[in-house]
Image (tube, helix red, strand yellow):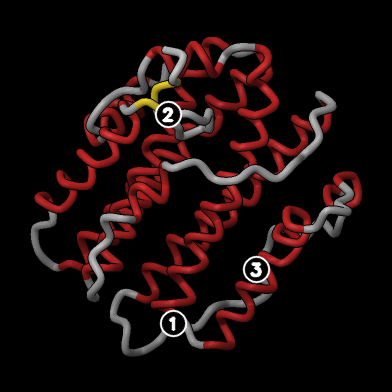
Amino acid sequence: MYQQLLAPVRAFLGCETPDSWIAEAIKPERLSLLLIDHCNCELKAAQTAMFLIRKYAVDADSGQLLLEWAKPYEEFVYHRDRDVTAFMARDSRKNELAAQLVAKKEFAHGDDLIAKMVRLIKEEFHHFEQVLELMLARQIPYSNLHAGRYAKGLMRHVTTHEPDTLIDKLIIGALIEARSCERFAKLAPHLDDELGRFYVSLLRSEARHYQDYLVLAEAIAGNDISERVAFLVDREAALIQAPDSEFRFHSGVPLSA
């Protein structure tokens, strides 16, 4: 039912998730780690989008509005004395930006970047809470995890001069969102009904997120970026297909395989 949605995602990525990763991910003893890392990934996705807006598209006042928006989520994650029930029960306007952001006049693509990234942030915060709610119902406590090698491995290839730095980061954002979408689809048939339905429900937004990142990269570049996209697609596929000593949502082939 979602093959049409996934077709461009799979065409964009350089490889499919290896069956050995799926086999590891669906083990009952991996469920807690899978959900905790998924939860973290949703927050990291929001933080990445916020960083791009703050660095490139808005002034300090608007940047402060973004920091205030993220504050409850970051306080929950980074403080040891976290209260899941209190976090989930806070004000019903918890997932709204307090005021409209103002784009820098000197950045021609500011309004477009803000519009796409604010929508992404709102959805990622919502997904973070949805995963947390699932964990709470299953008595899986949230805990901090150190990041795997995936995102750092991609960021090592970012060009160090602008605007190519921004373009590379947008392409990498597209790759991470596309990979998440592909893995949700691959995992869904193997999970219990509740989790399976939830992962299927995420596909449409994740597919749109990858397209938003890619459209922004193409617009800001103003020329053909297919060669750079192909390079980073290859690097991402290499990370996914390489042996990995740690299991994470975006990890590579489990060493046991």
Callout 1: few (<14), some (14-19), or many (20+) C-alpha neighbours within 10 Å?
many
Residue 137 to residue 216: above or below: above
Question: Which labelled disc corresponds to residue 103?
Answer: 1
User: Hey, what amino acid is under mark 3?
Assistant: Leu
Callout 3 secondary element: loop
Callout 2 secondary element: strand
Is residue 122 found left or right of 120 in the rendered image? right
Give residue 78's quadrant in the image. Answer: bottom right
Which image quadrant: the C terminus?
Answer: top left
Query: Of the residues tagged 2 and 3, which is closer to the observer?
Result: 2
- The span from disc 3 to disc 1 (Cα, nearest Å) is 15 Å
User: Hey, what amino acid is under mark 2?
Assistant: Asp
Question: x, y percentage for residue 124?
Answer: 58, 49
Is residue 18 found left or right of 40 in the rendered image? left
Which image quadrant: the N terminus?
Answer: top left
Callout 3: few (<14), some (14-19), or many (20+) C-alpha neighbours within 10 Å?
some
List the residue tagged with mark 3.
97
User: Hey, what amino acid is under mark 1?
Assistant: Ala
Question: Which labelled disc corresponds to residue 244?
Answer: 2
In percent of the image, x 59 and y 36: which residue is there? 38
Query: Of the residues tagged 2 and 1, which is closer to the observer?
Result: 2
Question: x, y percentage for residue 43?
Answer: 60, 51
Which numbered disc flags the more N-terminal residue, 2 or 1? 1
Question: Which labelled disc corresponds to residue 199?
Answer: none
In percent of the image, x 14 and y 68: which residue is there? 222
- The span from disc 2 to disc 3 (Cα, nearest Å) is 38 Å
Is residue 172 found left or right of 96 in the rendered image? left
Callout 2: few (<14), some (14-19), or many (20+) C-alpha neighbours within 10 Å?
many
Q: Using the image as rendered, state which of residue 236 and residue 113 is in the foreground.
A: 236
Count numbered badges in the picture.
Answer: 3
Kindly check if marks 2 and 3 are in contact, taking CB atoms under 8 A apart as contact. no
